[in-house]
Image (cartoon, rainbow, N blue to C red):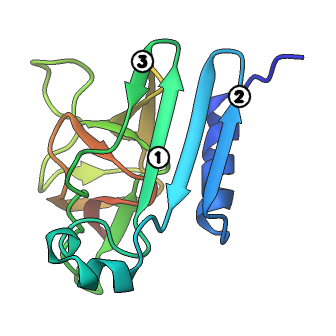
Amino acid sequence: MALKLDHDDLNHLIEKISKSDIQEFYLEGEDFKLEIKRNLINKQQSTQNPALKNEVTEGDDTQLIKNDNFVSTPPEVSPSVAPPGRSDLLEITSPMVGTFYRASAPGEDPFVEVGSSISVGQTICILEAMKLMNEIESEFNGVVVEVLVDNGTPVEFGQVLMRVKKS
C-alpha cells in the first residue's frame, strides 16, 4: 500500500510535530520523503564548542523534504528571526515550510508592497512547497506595514512573513 500525502495533510502533520516533543520523525511515501530532526545540539554542547555557538541552538528545527529528485533543505545559516513587532500590528506567518515569492512570476508586480491595503481573501504571497505553488490569502483587512522576507527566500513553518495594521 502506497502512502500519499497532500499539502493539507503535510501541513497538519508538520504543525502537530512542531507542537509535540518529538525529536526525530521520518516518513516515506510513494513520491516523497519527510524527515524532521529537532534540538540537534543542546546549549551545553554549544557553549563547550565556541565555533558552534552562533549556529544551531536548542529549539532550532531542521527539516528535509524530498520529492522525486528534488530536495529542499533550510539554508546553512538559520533564517533571521523577525525583529520584535509593535503591539498594534498583526503578524502574518508562514503556514508551511517552503519558498516565499512576492509575485506570481518573475518580473511581475508583487502582490503587496509596504503601504498596500489588503482585504480578506486577497492573495498576499505564494509559498512553493514540494513543487506546488500555494497562494497565501489574507485573513483580515488592513495595511501592510512590513514585509520581512525577501523574494525567493526559504521560510519555515510559523516564520513571520509580514506585519499588518488591521483596519
Instruction: Say which residue label 1 marks.
Output: 63
User: Splitting the image into 4 quarters, where does residue 34 fall?
Assistant: top right
Q: Left of 60 or right of it: where is 147?
A: left
- In the picture, the disc for residue 113 is none
Looking at the picture, which amino acid does disc 3 mark? Phe
Residue 27 visible in rendering: yes
Secondary element type, mark 1: strand
Quadrant showing the C terminus? bottom left
Marks 1 and 2 sit apart, C-alpha to C-alpha, by 17 Å
For the residue carrying disc 2, how many other residues have a C-alpha within 10 Å: few (<14), some (14-19), or many (20+)? some
Instruction: Say which residue label 2 marks.
Output: 5
> Where does residue 115 sit, x and y in percent of width and height?
12, 56
For the residue carrying disc 3, how many other residues have a C-alpha within 10 Å: few (<14), some (14-19), or many (20+)? few
For the residue carrying disc 1, how many other residues have a C-alpha within 10 Å: few (<14), some (14-19), or many (20+)? some
Mark 3 or 1, nearer chain start: 1
Determine whether 27 is above or below 37 in the image.
above
Mark 1 or 2, nearer chain start: 2
Determine whether 90 is above or below 140 in the image.
below
Secondary element type, mark 2: loop
> Where does residue 107 sit, x and y in percent of width and height?
9, 18
User: Splitting the image into 4 quarters, where does residue 52 fall?
Assistant: bottom left
Residue furthest right in the image:
1
Front in this rendered view, residue 162 or 8: 8
Instruction: Say which residue label 3 marks.
Output: 70
